[in-house]
Image (spheres, rainbow, N blue to C red):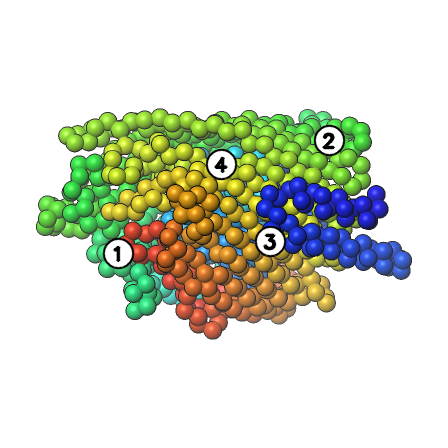
Amino acid sequence: MTDTHAHASCMGSAANGLADRRLVPGLLVLACGLGGASNAWSQEAAATNGPVTTLPAITITSTRIQQSPIDTPASVSTIDSRSLHEGQPQVNLSESLAAVPGLQAQNRNNYAQDLQISMRGFGARSTFGIRGIRIYVDGIPATMPDGQGQISNIDIASAERVEILRGPYSSLYGNSSGGVIQVFTAPGEGPPKLGAEFSAGTAGSRRYGLHASGATPYDLGLTDYNVSASRYALDGYREHSGMRKNLGNARLGLQLSDDSSLTLIANHLDIRADDPLGLTQAEYDRDPRSATPNATLYNTRKTIEQTQLGANYEKQIDASNTLNAMFYVGQRKTIQYQAIPAAVQSRSPTHAGGVIDLKRQYGGVDMRWTSRLELAPGPLTVIGGLSYEQMNEDRLGYENFLGPASAPTALGVKGKLRRDEANTLRSLDPYIQASWRLGERWTVEGGLRYSTVRFSSRDHYVTGGNGDDSGDAQYKKLLPVAALRYALTPDLSLYASAGRGFETPTFNEISYRPGGLPGLNFDLKPATSNNYEIGAKARLGEGLLTAALFHIDTSDEIVSDTNEGGRSTFKNAGKTRRQGLELSWDGPVLMDDLRFQASYTWLDAVVRDPEAGDGKYIPGVARQSLYAALSWLPRQGWRAGIDWRYMDKLYANSANTAQAPSYVTTGLFAGYKHTYQNWELSAMARVDNVFDRRYIGSVIVNESNSRYYEPAMGRNWTVSLNAAYRF
């Protein structure tokens, strides 16, 4: 095929891949322009017989078919070890996620609620934790079976890389997969290594960490290990926002035989965090470091204890077939004290109180078989699997006061029982996917997943005025995905993909019914979405340039309905539309040690239903964001870097009458790394928000008292020291 024909094919695929024609011309110019530029570059290199530098071998695993980034027909970004660790405090994953286009990571500066992360607009409505996005650590889910996730148990210090999958391909992970974040712990290497780290910074932050890693000879059985433990404490930037977190993580690799291996993962998390709650506009204007008065009056706070164990087994059956099996179990206990007035709780016998006490036991298994076949005109990879997950939840509710509601004797304490129910969720998902290479240029991929999710609730709190609210619900959905890739040259590829997404409500979202009615809101339907994407990837020297256009139509979008008296209820909002453009660049400039990263996102996310506010922008989603970073990172010696972030305004409510303004921040770091005999030593100093901008870091969507705003920190600093000894 000639270059002219290749460009015509590009235009045809683009026109068929997106329903909204307003998005097509931009990518046609970009992708086809990249094709011309890359062809010209390749021809020039060939004509001069000059050497062509290629990227180091990087393998993407998020699509379950191992391949290089440029060969993957999906939007996948990789955050490597340097981006995770060099010049970063290594406290929150949001530090490095800002470089990923299409992903919005907001630090609430509130460790009682975790980060606020959305991907192409999915997850933006979450008032706590992470919704609409699947999270995995070493292949083990960090998202609960009902779709509610958290990243507070991720140990950044021991992480090797993070993969972020966006777009249609994420549907192959089933329920609540508007995107996928996968974190991988670094395997141990070489002789035993023991290290310690310490950091301190603004607002009384301090972090202590210990880690040990290494690898042993094969005949000893234990081939590699990486164990870490840390404690992070914070006095708090805002009033009533102090916290402490203890975190332990262990990865053990066992080579059982020449053709089988077992990786064991253990993780423990213990958090105690005060909750300053959101601020109204007037409270924010008066003092952004304050807490709402009820936060201190009721001593709002949250404690979390979580322990999780997992195993990944791989068996090479023969040269063409591989068996993979993943098992995991965990338990999570959460106690949260809310700021619900005593009078509100006493009005109705169906009120669940102001203290939430949750105990969850969960686990699952994922078995899959991979076959690599030879089928003319090219190799064919087929994967078949079965995933099962279960969660048992004991949900209790108590009053947050003692004594009569009219004159409480104590506030912010556990009082009378007001709720007692046992909830169960089970999901069973068979799936199959395939990748077939049709010659040197074409690759076709596809897959099917049939997702079945069953909710069950048994009410054990039946009293006068509060009847039996037990109930059941079941959701099923077939999730197809298809993708086509065309390689114009070895260093330039175009792709198009389409898929269907599926997101059930979580137990937290069905916990209350609108209008104060008792029982779970089983009338809430799952959201379904049709997802389309076209993109281009170009390898230029040792850097990678990517571009993607996407269009997503969602039906029965789950949105906030009411938020009154401490109760959040949800409803289905009819139809929404998300469409946008993502651009990114990552690679060295001028010399190997000088690295430049940049990403840009334009996202138009609106409601397309007259009854739900046709044309209103989906709250919590920025229309534009931009990130750029330049860093000098030699193997040893002095290092430094600067990064710049822009975030467009965020609407805080569905009516679009309240908003957090756009902002720009700048960060700087400098450090030194040195190796002396068996010692590895490093020091780093970092300053964020260098120009001390005053801005709102995140919003609480549709907060009933108009306390939408969670202020970001002003100018803040961190210094850290690290030392490790290799035996």
Q: Which residue is mark 1?
A: 295
Mark 1: give few (<14), some (14-19) or many (20+) Cα within 10 Å. Answer: many
Q: Are marks 2 and 1 in contact (CB under 8 Å)?
A: no
Q: Which residue is mark 3?
A: 582
1 displayed left or right of 470? right
Q: Secondary structure at mark 3?
A: strand
Task: Measure the alpha-carbon separation of dots 2 and 1.
Answer: 58 Å
Mark 4: give few (<14), some (14-19) or many (20+) Cα within 10 Å. Answer: many
Q: Residue furthest front?
A: 610
Residue 304 location, quadrant = top left
Q: Secondary structure at mark 4?
A: strand
Q: Nearer the viewer, residue 363 or 553?
A: 553
Query: x%, y% of residue 108?
Result: 40, 57
Query: Which of disc 4 and disc 1 is earlier in sequence?
Result: 1
Q: Secondary structure at mark 1?
A: helix
Tell me which residue sits at (39%, 59%) in the image. 659
Q: Which residue is mark 2?
A: 380
Tell me which residue sits at (24%, 38%) in the image. 516
Query: x%, y% of residue 648?
Result: 49, 61
Whether residue 636 appears in this view of the structure is no
Query: Which of disc 4 and disc 2 is earlier in sequence?
Result: 2
Query: Which of disc 3 and disc 4 is earlier in sequence?
Result: 4
Q: Give the residue type at disc 3.
A: Glu
Q: Give the residue type at disc 2.
A: Leu
Q: Which residue is mark 4?
A: 528
Query: Which of disc 3 and disc 2 is earlier in sequence?
Result: 2
Whether residue 86 appears in this view of the structure is yes
Q: Are marks 4 and 3 in contact (CB under 8 Å)?
A: no
Residue 670 location, quadrant = bottom right
Q: Give the residue type at disc 4.
A: Thr
Query: x%, y% of residue 613?
Result: 40, 47
The answer to whether residue 692 is above or below residue 530 is: below
